[in-house]
Amino acid sequence: MPVARPEPSEVRVIAHVDLDCFYVQVEQRKRPELRGKPTGVVQYNPWRGGGLIAVGYEARQFGVTRNMRGDEAKKVCPNIELIQVPVAHGKADLTQYRDAGSEVVAVLSRKGTCERASIDEVYLDITDACVASALEEQFSDDVLKSHVLGLSEMLAKLASGMHKPAQQTLVPSSSVTKLLATLPIKKMKQLGGKLGDSLQSDLRVVFVGDLLQFSESKLQNLYGINTGTWLWNIARGLSGDEVKPRTLPKSHSCGKTFPGPKSLKNLAEVKHWITELAMELQERLETDLCQNHRMAHLLTLHAGTSQGYKTNSDNKFPSKSCVLRYGKEKIASDAFKLFERALSDYLAQNKASPIKGGSGIWAVTSLFIGASNIWAIPSGVNPITQFFSAPASPENSFLKDKECSSPVSPSNFLNTEPSTSSDNKCAYIEMCYDLRSDTSFAGTCKDVGTSTFLVSKCEETKHLIVDPYSSTSDHNVIEEKDTFPMDYMQESDDITCTPTFGDFMNVNGQASLKLDVFDPCHRLLDLSNTDSNLEFKEQTSLETPQAVIQCSPVDLDLSSSEPPTAEFACQATNESQIRDTALVSNYKLINTDGNESQTRRKELPAEGDQQMCHSWKLRDIWDRKLSGHKQCDTPPSKQNQYLWGYKQEDIDAQILSELPEEIQEELCRSLGIKRSKKSTIGDFFKSYAQGTGSRAD
DNA sequence: ATTGTCAAGCG
DNA sequence: CGCTTGAC
């Protein structure tokens, strides 16, 4: 739900661009002979002609609609051309449509701030262009203010859907009231669901304008402070939503459903499909991250199941996440492990309710994996490309041919960036890649008080430093959080330990570390520890064994020169097998500025115990500036390999002639086909003022 | 048997 | 985070 915000300080002019029957247009561009013919795009042909996901306007006249089956469409429109969505990895592949959407964004971003809202939708803030145009055309302020395209994203989106296809709609401020007075409440962006239902049934609100009769406090009482004020505002055509400058997706995900009889009933099937999905995800990550100098941190698995349980608790199949490791094999195996963990939780949760067969009958009806937490890598830092291309051997060490010498020890690495500034508002993310264990580690940290921690993994590592929060540029500031997540994944045979969401805290010069530990295989039955410096909270019952390991505060004397170190280890044992020893962790807290060193060490496990030891260093690092921060999202024209400049011959004359006249004129002008008069937006206002444009009222 | 992807809010 | 909702 949108959060109530202070009113925008100035009037903005915002356009919402929505491509008509987008997939159809993409196909028609590929095959121009399809233009003018009834055309639809279907995915998956085998079952009843496939499902229609896009319908051209010619076909709509025959009554063909979205979500029809291909066979039904043929029935009402025998001449319809049905194009199949490409298939890759055994599933529908939308790449070409995403890329086509990127072309559109690239073109539009030359005109103003773009926010890519979906595969075929863009918000465009053209305030500056309008003002410039108005000045050039010597429009008065009055004219400009009464002829805006939309005062907000909300109005712009509303308007863009009003005259389809191939038409523009202006929303002058003077028509807002009238427009909202007859706009059905459920048409509004956030009101298509339950909230809209409630407004209708509880408040008898039919049109958005009907909300005007309720006071702000009344709405707040009914729907909460935020939703209430939001409702009050939209009734008046006000919205705090601004166009967020973002042309790249915040995450990537791919999934597939396995409806009815297609459901997956054993792990082998699940593994197969996860592998397919992983391949697609890897491909998409590789292109996006390499091209755009970005990095992703989180892998998430999401699955849906149906099972033999009849009535009782319809527990949802849980989602799981871990640190993203690159490469299709790693993504596939990590995702599969996440699935096993989720399945384990799921079965344990549902065990309470008896089932007829007595065995755990489950069937996966959907699988979904995604990569998120994507960050821009600052310029001057090695690109993510190296994660994909470089062989995992020390000889090809990440930093070898770069300014830093190789191999890189953590201290060496840290010293390459000397302290230069007293500005400590920076936070850093570092990603480490261990060449030997072939694992990656990502940690985030934050400046606390006067010091900034950098999370680093010992041993031979690849390093990336990312500065997602630029202290120098306002628009790079991320929201404040009290704590930051830290994930780590380590494998050993079939055991996976994933401490998730550890929090580092530095309170009054003391640091403590908290980690949540899971055993995905449900065998971590006993967590033992003799170190008084640790606190365990063991969770019981059928859930995944879980413990919170907390290190008591370690003194951080910032004035001393030797780093205090806290090492601790814990061990979890299985009752039966020694090789099931699940976890021995060894953590160090190191403050490079301190000279006092504290060490807490647990006895190493007895001989024969197989164990894994890891030490993490927490270093208090200096303030440092990475020169030349890269913006999170620079325009695709610079960043994207899709550098689309359209050529005149690419514009189909037939399509041009189908457009409304004033748009034709505008296009011709901007392409320099006919006349060479400039200032297109001003002309558009003029034509609108003369009554030739479409308008909302 | 409405697919596959997104973003965003909530606890 | 993990879950839900809404939207295209």
Image (cartoon, coloured by chain):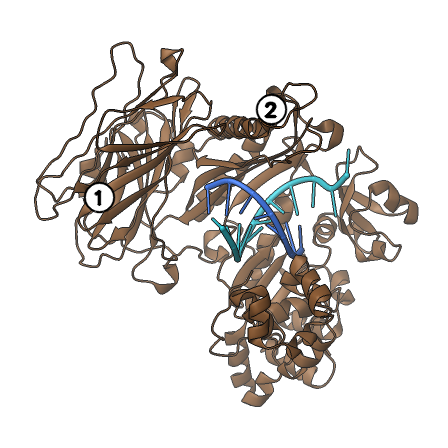
Chain colours: A brown, B cyan, C blue
Few, some or many C-alpha atoms within 10 Å of disc 1 (few <14, some 14-19, many ≥20)?
many
A110 left or right, relative to A480: right
The residue shown at (82%, 56%) is: A36
Tell me what residue is drawn at x 23 percent, y 30 percent.
A407
Q: Residue at x 45, y 40 (%)?
A: A298
Residue A345 lies, in percent from the top left, at 52, 29
Q: Position of residue A280 (x, y in %)?
A: 57, 35
In the image, is residue A131 above or below residue A630?
Answer: below
Amino acid carrying label 1: it is: Ala
Pick the quarter of the image with the N terminus of chain A: bottom right
Which residue lies under the disc numbered 1? A511
Res A272 label: 2
Residues A419 and A258: in front is A258
Q: Check the residue under mark 2 and report the chain it is in.
A: A
Is disc 2 placed on a helix, strand or loop?
Answer: helix
| Secondary structure found at label 1 | strand
Instruction: Establish whether labels 1 and 2 are both on one chain.
Output: yes
Q: Residue A419's mark?
A: none
Mark 1 or 2, nearer chain start: 2
**Quadrant hosting residue A651:** bottom right
Chain to which mark 1 belongs:
A
Inter-mark Cα distance, 1 to 2: 44 Å
Which numbered disc, 1 or 2, marks the residue closer to the eye? 1
Amino acid type of the residue tagged 2 in the rendering: His
User: Which image quadrant: the C terminus of chain A?
Assistant: bottom right
- Number of labels in the image equals 2
Return the x and y of residue A490 as percentages of the image width and height: 37, 27
Left or right: residue A664 compared with residue A302 = right
Whether residue A49 is situated above or below residue A66 in the rendered picture:
above
Residue A175 percent across, percent down from the top left: 68, 81
Is A63 on the left or on the right of A518, as rendered? right
